[in-house]
């Protein structure tokens, strides 16, 4: 098998290929396809050849045409005179939902004859069969055999571009065996392989395919929300599952933490206790890992050489790949893999490990940002809770009879919200709002709040101002929840008979409806200056008799369930 490696340049990716060439191109992404498509057609147009692109993907048509236009100054002239055509598959391959080999072969010959009559030297094609359905696969493979016959007898050259994501191993074998040449990508280079025998081509493609699967596993892993150390351990497991690294299944990941001169081992697999002790912290510049961090370059060894300065008892002959983990020009750590003694250095392995390290770097930065955010939110939560508790204490100091009322309302309202399966954010907001729902009573004279007898209408009207006052106090505080609105609405009722706004039904926040029910139940079950406490049974009867009238039916049902079935108690 003849194999030639070519760099990705405009002039030498299969641009000039002889008549009768039938080549398959395996690509991993849209860019790979366009990198081949542009110089291929640019050369064809320049060489007076009739060019056709067959595809089923509008994005390939649009971006491919734009890329050719950028590369060929007179592209619109070529397009206007008909030297290049972009054809959708259903205009050529499919008729009445059927794939007919003979019909398509005839179209090929007719197109070529028309091109020759117009003075073109021959026909150059790219076929992108992304449209191919499973039911048409066998017919299309047979069609490729027919294409070989046509091409061998006419002035035609064609590239069949197949997506690796849409081909399994058996299909790759069939495709390769029906083409004279194969174009595949190896790192940043293209390999142009003459197909004297397809087995080596299949192996190369399968290696690329396996590499892509491994990288996809890392990308999928990076999107999970698992504990960070667990993520690092899974990363090592995936690497050690690769055949070239599984013969010495040992590896670890070091990170730089508070001390920027020290690598700290954060995760490892199959690490002996003596190594764990000796290598738990490695200074930058020491041993191969320290050298990788200091030089920002991969360190390779196939034996225990003089760079291996960290030693311990019972150490066995081995080698290393130590790969620096770098993000935004900052070294974050090192990926360390053990190798069998005498392992041969391999550039492809290094490129692959560097890709993994780059992915790992992004995850490390994201996880650190998340930890910092969680820490900041935790401090913010503590600050809010401290402020809320100070407000609660202030209110309860003025009204000792209601001491603990807001806390108990908050507990009951939060339990109702949990039972209703509300989001954690809503539940937390209800807890906070419940804790300060009577904040506005700070403006009500304590003589009214603690009055032992019946209050007058005027006094009741003063008390009824407390939701608005509470709202006015909190409305300019940027809580993560609508605390001020909840407080404003917690005395509104379903039928519009509440206060201060007289709103009803769907206009009332669910959080306010929950606190309203919890407030009534707790108030009735607690002692007041003007009356003794009622029983929970009577409080539940009150909300049940006014279900759908004053109180939200769902909230009432859940509240009753908490007391009767879940044995909830006000404490």
Image (spheres, helix red, strand yellow):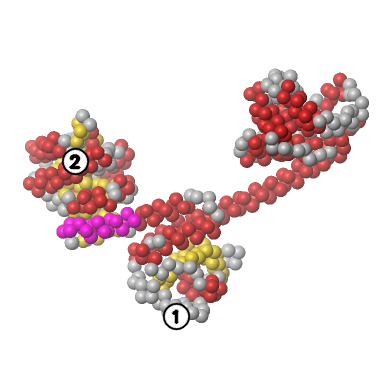
Q: Residues within 10 Å of mark 1 (few under 14, many from 20)?
A: few
Residue 564 rendering spot, x and y as whole percentages: 71, 33
Residue that carries the numbered disc 1 in the rendered image: 306
Task: Reply above or below: 298 against 18.
Answer: below
Magenta residues, as a range?
190-210
Determine whether 355 is above or below 75 in the image: below
Q: Quadrant of residue 5?
A: bottom left
- For mark 2, give the secondary structure: helix
What quarter of the picture does the N terminus occupy?
bottom left
519 is within the stretch colored magenta:
no
The residue labelled by disc 2 is 139
Question: 262 and 460: which one is in front?
Answer: 460
Name the residue at 67% across, 28% down: 557
Q: Is residue 449 left or right of residue 59?
A: right
Which residue occupies the extreme front position in the image?
Answer: 565
Residue 224 is tagged as: none
**Mark 1 vs mark 2, CA separation in Å:** 62 Å
Looking at the magenta stretch, what is its main secondary structure? helix
Residue 484 image offset from top left, x and y in percent: 71, 33
Q: Residue at x 43, y 70 (%)?
A: 338
**Which of the two discs, 1 and 2, sits closer to the camera?**
2
Q: Is residue 194 magenta?
A: yes
Look at the image and tell me whether residue 20 can be seen. yes
Q: Position of residue 368 (x, y in %)?
A: 56, 55
Which residue is at a point 75% across and 28% down the rendered structure image?
A: 540
Q: Is residue 474 left or right of residue 66?
A: right
Residue 297: quarter of image: bottom left
Q: Is residue 466 visible?
A: no
User: Looking at the image, is 426 positioned above or below residue 7?
Assistant: above
- Quarter of the rendering occupied by the C terminus: top right
Q: Residue at x 47, y 78 (%)?
A: 315
Helix, strand or loop at label 1? It is loop
């Amino acid at each position: 098998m003849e194999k030639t490696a070519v760099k990705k340049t405009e002039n030498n990716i299969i641009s000039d290929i002889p008549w009768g060439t039938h080549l398959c191109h395996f690509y991993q992404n849209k860019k790979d396809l366009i990198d081949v498509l542009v110089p291929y057609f640019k050369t064809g147009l320049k060489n007076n050849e009739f060019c056709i692109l067959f595809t089923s993907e509008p994005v390939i048509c649009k971006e491919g045409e734009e890329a050719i236009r950028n590369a060929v100054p007179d592209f619109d002239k070529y397009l206007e005179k008909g030297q290049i055509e972009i054809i959708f598959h259903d205009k050529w391959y499919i008729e009445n939902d059927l794939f007919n080999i003979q019909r398509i072969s005839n179209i090929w010959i007719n197109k070529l004859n028309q091109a020759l009559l117009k003075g073109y030297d021959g026909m150059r094609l790219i076929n992108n069969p992304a449209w191919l359905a499973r039911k048409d696969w066998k017919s299309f493979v047979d069609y490729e055999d027919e294409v070989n016959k046509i091409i061998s007898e006419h002035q035609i050259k064609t590239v069949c571009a197949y997506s690796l994501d849409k081909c399994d191993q058996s299909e790759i074998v069939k495709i390769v065996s029906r083409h004279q040449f194969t174009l595949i990508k190896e790192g940043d280079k293209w390999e142009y392989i003459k197909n004297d025998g397809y087995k080596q081509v299949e192996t190369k493609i399968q290696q690329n395919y396996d590499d892509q699967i491994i990288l996809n596993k890392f990308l999928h892993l990076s999107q999970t929300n698992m504990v960070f150390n667990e993520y690092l351990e899974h990363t090592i497991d995936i690497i050690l599952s690769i055949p070239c690294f599984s013969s010495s299944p040992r590896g670890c990941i070091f990170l730089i933490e508070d001390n920027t001169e020290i690598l700290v081992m954060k995760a490892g697999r199959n690490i002996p206790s003596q190594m764990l002790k000796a290598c738990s912290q490695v200074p930058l510049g020491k041993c191969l890992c320290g050298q990788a961090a200091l030089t920002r370059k991969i360190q390779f060894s196939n034996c225990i050489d003089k760079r291996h300065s960290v030693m311990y008892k019972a150490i066995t002959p081995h080698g290393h790949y130590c790969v620096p983990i770098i993000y935004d020009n900052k070294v974050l750590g090192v990926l360390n893999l053990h190798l069998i003694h005498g392992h041969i250095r391999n550039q492809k392995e290094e490129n692959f490990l560097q890709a993994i390290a780059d992915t790992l770097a992004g995850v490390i930065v994201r996880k650190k940002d998340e930890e910092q955010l969680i820490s900041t939110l935790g401090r913010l939560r503590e600050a809010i809770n401290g402020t809320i508790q100070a407000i609660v204490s202030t209110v309860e100091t003025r009204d000792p009879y209601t001491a603990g009322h807001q806390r108990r309302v908050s507990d009951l309202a939060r339990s109702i919200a949990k039972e209703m399966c509300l989001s954690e954010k809503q539940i937390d907001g209800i807890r906070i709002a419940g804790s300060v729902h009577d904040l506005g009573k700070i403006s009500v004279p304590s003589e009214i709040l603690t009055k032992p007898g019946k209050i007058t209408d005027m006094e009741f009207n003063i008390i009824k101002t407390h939701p608005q006052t509470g709202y006015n106090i909190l409305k300019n505080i940027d809580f993560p929840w609508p605390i001020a609105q909840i407080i404003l609405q917690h005395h509104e009722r379903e039928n519009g008979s509440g206060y201060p706004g007289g709103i009803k039904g769907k206009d009332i926040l669910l959080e306010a409806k929950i606190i309203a029910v919890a407030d009534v139940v707790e108030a009735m079950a607690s002692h007041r200056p003007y009356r003794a406490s009622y029983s929970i049974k009577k409080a539940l009867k009150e909300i049940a008799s006014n279900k759908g009238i004053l109180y939200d039916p769902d909230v009432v049902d859940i509240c009753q369930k908490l007391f009767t079935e879940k044995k909830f108690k006000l404490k």
